[in-house]
Amino acid sequence: DRVRFYAFGRVFSGTVRTGQKVRIMGPPNYQIGKKNDLFVKNIKRTVIMMGRYVESVEDIPAGNTVGLVSVDQYLLKSGTITTSENAHCFRVMKFSVSPVVRVAVQCKYPSDLPKLVEGLKHLSKSDSMVQTTVEESGEHIIAGAGELHLEICLKDLREKYCGGIELKTSDPVVSYRETVTEVSNQICLSKSPNKHNRLYVNAEPLKSGLSEDIDNGKVTEKDDVKSRARYLAETYEWDVNDARKIWCFGPENTGPNILTDVSKFIPYLYEIKDSV
C-alpha cells in the first residue's frame, strides 16, 4: 500500500515487540494525565530497515533503530511510543532551515479534489520539513526549504500520493519575513470597526535571550502571571506591571513575539482583548 508508512525511530529504553500494546503520544497536544493526542494500540509488526530491504523480527532491544507497522495512522510527523503511563513526549525536532518557499497547488479537474486532499495529508506525513496549509481563499499551499525540495515534493504528490492526477501549480514564492532591530520611530494607530476603540502600538526588540527562553518553554502563555512577571523583571529588567499585562505570544500563541498592554488608567480595555 503506497499510502501506508513505517514508523521509524530508535529504541531508547526497554524492548519493543510484535503484538505489544503501547501508548502512542503525539507531541503537539498531548499532556501527561490527559487523553488529547493519545492512542493505545497494538504493534502488528516490528522490522529492521536495511537500505532497500526490510526484515521482520520478533523484538528489538534498546539502542537500535526500528520500523513499526500499523502505528503510522496515529502519528503525523513524529511522536513518542511507550508502555509507561508516566512518560513524557520527546521534544519536536527543530531544523536549521525553515519552509519559506511556497507554491499553490490545485487539481485540473474538480472531481479529483478528494484525491488531492488525501495526497497532501500523506505528503505532510512523509516529510518532516514540508508544511501543507489551506488558505482562507481555499488554496492549498505547500511550503518547503527551497525550489528543489518543492520540486521533489510535487513529484511525489503527483505520482505516489494522488494516483497520477493532473495538478496545476503556481510559481514558487518566498515568504516575506521581518524582525525588529530597534524601537520604532512612529506609533501606529488602529481603529475598531465601530470606531469606538483606538489602539496605539509601537514595536521594540526583546532583550537578548528572551526569545530563546520562549522557544525553550521557560516563558509561556500558560505560566502563572505573577511568577512570569517576577522572572521577566529579575532576568530581563521588565516593569512588573507591564509584565503582568501580557496579552498574548505569537505566532500561534507560542512564538517569540509578545503583545503587551502598557496603557495606564484606561478602563475596560481588557474587555476588548479577544477582539483584537
Image (tube, rainbow, N blue to C red):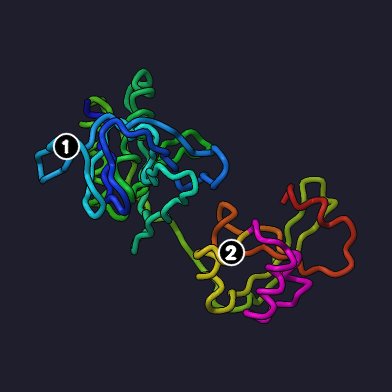
Determine the secondary structure under disc 2. strand
Instruction: Specify the principal SS of the magenta part.
Output: helix
Q: Amino acid at mark 2?
A: Asn
Residue toward you, 221 or 11: 11
Task: Give the residue at mark 1.
Answer: 57
Name the residue: 46% across, 49% down. Answer: 87
Task: Give the residue at mark 2.
Answer: 257
Q: Amino acid at mark 1?
A: Val
As drawn, is 212 to the left or to the right of 166?
right
Q: Is residue 240 magenta?
A: yes
**Which quadrant of the figure contains the N terminus?**
top left
Name the residue: 56% across, 66% down. Answer: 218
- Establish if 21 lies above or below 226: above
Q: Is residue 261 magenta?
A: no
Mark 1: few/some/many CA within 10 Å (<14, 14-19, 20+): few
Q: At which x and y percent is residue 66?
A: 23, 45
Q: At which x and y percent is residue 12?
A: 31, 54
Q: At which x and y percent is residue 207?
A: 58, 78
Q: Which residues are magenta?
A: 221-245
